[in-house]
Amino acid sequence: MTKTVLEQIADLDAQREKLISEGLKSAKEQVESALAELNALGLTQYVLTLKVSGGTGVKRAPIGGPCPVCLYLTDPPHDGRKHRSQETNAPFTDAELGMMHMTKV
């Protein structure tokens, strides 16, 4: 029995989704392998993040990661948005951290 045009389109859509997911999985594995090599060098801790289109370009740390400006963790955690009030973005001093009720981890 021959398939209708709509059935053929549905089959092609399913095949397309399968190919895209396989391609994404393969690419992600390659990137994670490369990141593991970079991290093994021990110079910097690299992580894979997802960039959402649009936005304001504000530096944000990955969840649980260090601030991209300070390069250290704090309790409570913060990211680059916390540095908006600074004339030029720089790591917070101990006095500034104390005023914001934050401590280095």
Image (cartoon, helix red, strand yellow):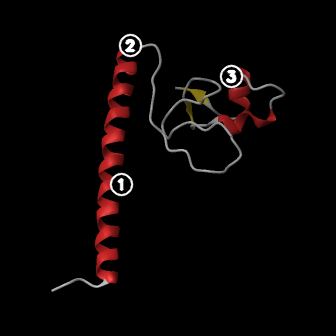
Q: Which residue is mark 3?
A: 91
Q: Which residue is mark 2?
A: 41
Secondary element under disc 3, as helix, strand or loop, is: loop
51 and 105: which is toward the camera: 51
The residue mark sitting in front, 1 or 3, is 1
Amino acid type of disc 3?
A: Pro
Mark 1 burial class by Cα count in 10 Å: few <14, some 14-19, many 20+: few
Q: Which residue is mark 1?
A: 20
Amino acid type of disc 2?
A: Leu
| Mark 2 / mark 3, whichever is N-terminal | 2
Q: Quadrant of residue 47?
A: top left
At horizontal 56% and vertical 24% (from top left) the residue drawn is 72
| C-alpha separation, residue under disc 2 versus residue under disc 3 | 25 Å
**Residue at the extreme right of the image, as rendered:** 87
Residue 97: x %, y % from top left: 68, 28
Q: Is 12 positioned to the left or the right of 56 in the image?
A: left
11 and 66: which is toward the camera: 11
Secondary element under disc 2, as helix, strand or loop, is: helix
